[in-house]
Image: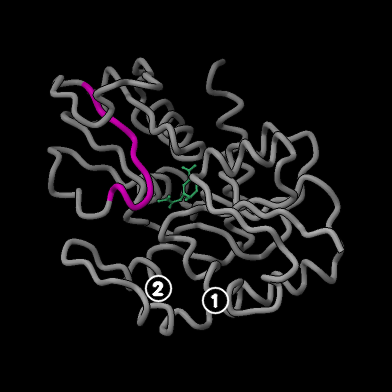
Amino acid sequence: MKKIRISAVSYTNTKPFIYGIEHSNILNKIDLSLDMPSDCAQKLIDDEADIGLIPVAAILSLPVWNIVSDYCIGANGAVNSVFIFSNCEAKDIKTLQLDPESRSSNNLARVLLKNHWKVNPELVTSAADYTTSTDANTAFVQIGDRTFGKKEQYPYVYDLAEEWLNFSGLPFVFAAWVANKNIPKDFMDEFNQALKFGLDNRAELFKEMPKRDDFDVEDYLMHKIDFELTDNKERALHLFHNYIKQLDK
Ligand SMILES: C=C(O[C@@H]1C=C(C(=O)O)C=C[C@H]1O)C(=O)O
């Protein structure tokens, strides 16, 4: 049988899913690649993958898409790995540098700046000094493991899942398991069982993971990342898509 091509996020937030996949028979039925989120999205768009854990903002670039799992990378309040790091208060940001690895959080930052903080900064997509600008009114978006331990390093720090909750009253979903074609149900059932196995066995995973002094990985994977794709998260996803569509209007 032809293997199903799967692209999953290469960050710590996806480790429970990978643990589940690697400890189940589904591993023999897939070609698994671990990629930065923007590449997960591009592979699904270019049909180099059949299923991806893709940034939900990128769903808007897919002609055909199905969410194929009840699990996701989400948060209900502070997520602790998606930030605007800034030299000034959000309302004073004049230039925002985006994270090249992100699709959802770059858009979330834009949605919040426009609708929550009511400002319209200039966007920079590939600045050489992406994270090091000393300009008083410049800020940047950063996601994933590169943010670990950085919260104390910047004058103003905004956790975007927390700010989204303040703004909308809803949890947030950053990435979902999406297919760009029909996938047989028995395969999806087995795949979802593997994801569940990983979540159920996070304590075993932690034994294999290095500890960090500057970041509580266990708290992050038990309490900050929220893996269930609930009705409220789906509601948030649709609301987020609508805000993205309004961004350039
Ligand atoms: C919570 C996170 O969620 C992620 C954020 C994404 C994005 O901004 O496009 C995509 C996938 C997830 O890895 C994170 O990476 O820290």
Disc 2 vs disc 1: Cβ atoms closer than 8 Å? no
* Gap in angstroms between the C-alphas marked 2 and 1: 12 Å
- The image quadrant where one finds the N terminus is bottom right
How many numbered markers are drawn? 2
Which residue is pictured at 59% across the width and 58% down the height?
Answer: 232
- The picture places residue 127, in percent across and down from the top left corner, at 32, 20
Between discs 2 and 1, the one toward the N terminus? 1
Dot 2: what SS? helix
Dot 1: what SS? helix
| Residue 139 lies within the magenta run | yes
Question: As rendered, which of 59 and 19 lies closer to the eye?
Answer: 19
Left or right, 16 with reference to 28: left
- The picture places residue 88, in percent across and down from the top left corner, at 17, 29
Span colored in magenta: 138-147
Judged by depth in the image, the label closer to the viewer, 2 or 1, is 1
Instruction: Count residues near mark 2 (Cα–Cα under 10 Å), then give few for <14, some for 14-19, many for 20+.
Output: some
Which residue is pictured at 36% across the width and 47% down the height?
Answer: 82
Instruction: Count residues near mark 1 (Cα–Cα under 10 Å), then give few for <14, some for 14-19, many for 20+.
Output: many
Which residue is pictured at 65% across the width and 55% down the height?
Answer: 177
Query: What type is the residue that disc 1 sits on?
Result: Gly
Q: Which residue is mark 1?
A: 198
Query: What type is the residue that disc 2 sits on?
Result: Met
Quadrant of the rendered image containing residue 210: bottom left
Looking at the image, is 109 positioned above or below residue 160? above
Question: As rendered, which of 233 and 64 lies closer to the eye?
Answer: 64
Q: Which residue is mark 2?
A: 222
- The image quadrant where one finds the C terminus is top right
